[in-house]
Amino acid sequence: MLGFKKLLLIRLETWNTQKDGKQRTELNDSQARSENKLHSLFNASLFAIFNQYYENKSLVKHTKKITRFIFYV
């Protein structure tokens, strides 16, 4: 089992990455006026989180499950 400090570090990195994804799409605090912009923000945030996860996968124990990521279009 992962220690508390490692879990906290992973959560903090995930939060920072999601925040960066929102800022790169210029939609700070989810202030979108159309559905397409919200979907774009959601996709960018998910991509940033998954990218951070795979870059730091040595911090997380893996299972051999195959996961599928669903993106809105």
Image: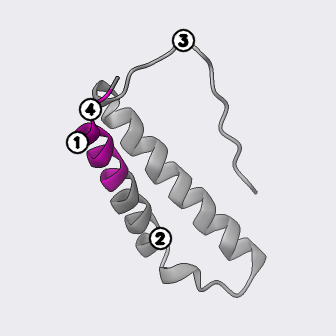
Asked if the stretch drawn in magenta spans residue 5, the answer is yes
Label 2 packing within 10 angstroms: few (<14), some (14-19), many (20+): many
Return the disc, 2 or 3, that comes first in the chain's sequence.
Answer: 2
Q: Secondary structure at mark 2?
A: helix
Q: In the figure, is residue 65 to the left or right of 23?
A: right
Q: Which mark is residue 5?
A: 1
Q: Could you say which quadrant of the image residue 41 lies in?
A: bottom right
Q: Is residue 17 above or below residue 8?
A: below
Mark 4 → mark 2, Cα distance in angstroms: 29 Å
Q: Could you say which quadrant of the image residue 4 lies in?
A: top left
What percent of the width, then of the height, locates residue 10? Answer: 32, 44
Q: Is residue 6 above or below residue 49?
A: above
Whether label 1 touches label 4, CB < 8 Å: yes
Label 3 packing within 10 angstroms: few (<14), some (14-19), many (20+): few
Q: Which mark is residue 3?
A: 4
Mark 2 → mark 3, Cα distance in angstroms: 31 Å
Q: Residue at x 37, y 44 (%)?
A: 52
Q: Is residue 27 visible?
A: no
Question: What is the magenta range?
Answer: 2-13
Mark 1 → mark 3, Cα distance in angstroms: 25 Å
In the rendered image, the quadrant that contains the N terminus is top left
Q: Secondary structure at mark 1?
A: helix
